[in-house]
Image (tube, helix red, strand yellow):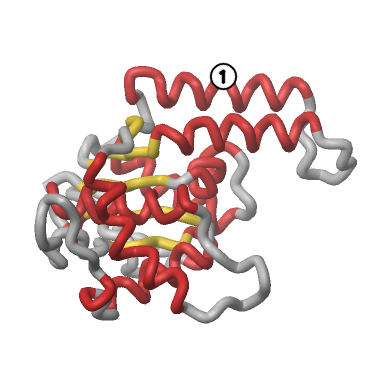
Amino acid sequence: MRTTYLFDASAAIEIYLPRNPRTKKTVQFILDQKKTFKQATLFIPNFCIVEVINTFGRKHFSNDDSNEKLSNEDYVKHLNRFREDVHWGRTLYQYELNRYHIIAADQIIPAEHRLPRRYEHDHLSTFDILIIAMACELGYIGSSEDTFLVTCDLRLKQVFDDLKKSDVSGFMVAGPLGEVDESRWTPPQCVYLPNAKHGELKHVSGQAPFNP
């Protein structure tokens, strides 16, 4: 069974601009499963591709003089590498938004709004909700145990975990297709890159266990 990963934009950026050695090592562990051991598929939501490109642009064109500002050389380098990585799915295979992801939002939204916020703007965007739906769908069509959502968004991780352990079936609304199968969108696994732990990621055949 191949391992399946869904990178959101915050995680995909770490491939090119890792925030620290620990995160870089975690991302490389996943990339090795795809490129070296040929036993993993790395997806990225199609709308996250634009978000990654926009992040590169923001870091380059910003008036900020901090170390995070990208020079013209680095901007072009990272942008070209990312384009190569998504071209024909060489590294990141774009995952298209579909009707099932939209239907799944009914189950995810209640978990988002009932989870206490750490501060005023601590909430998920509509696209974040769709990313969780995409991860659930990949787990459904494959294997929940072998499917991982990869993110650097702590709120997304917290909502994902709350959805995984809580019963939100009472919030589900029957649509034109009838009653919703509440087990359809069971969340798979979620890896929060800045704090990935020993044993949290599965290793593939021939690969040493994950040790951050």
Q: Secondary structure at mark 1?
A: helix
Count of picture labels: 1
Q: Residue at x 26, y 63 (%)?
A: 187
Q: Residue at x 51, y 60 (%)?
A: 124
Q: Indicate whether 40 appears above or below 197.
A: above
In the rendered image, which quarter is residue 169 located in? bottom left
Tell me, yes or no, if residue 178 can be seen here: yes
The answer, for residue 145, to whether it is visible in the render is no
Q: Position of residue 48 (x, y in %)?
A: 47, 38
**Alpha-carbon neighbours of circle 1 within 10 Å: few (<14), some, or many (≥20)?**
few
The percent coordinates of residue 195 (x first, y second) are 50, 67
Of 103 and 37, nearer the camera is 103
Q: Does residue 1 appear left or right of residue 151 in this picture?
A: left
Residue at 28%, 79% in the rendered image:
165
Q: Position of residue 41 (x, y in %)?
A: 26, 39
The residue that appears at 21% across and 40% down in the rendered structure is 39
Could you say which quadrant of the image residue 119 lies in?
bottom right
Q: Nearer the viewer, residue 91 or 115?
A: 115
Amino acid type for the residue under numbered disc 1? Asn
Q: Residue 111: where, in percent of width, then height? A: 38, 72
Q: Which residue is mark 1?
A: 80
From what the image shows, is residue 182 above or below residue 133?
below
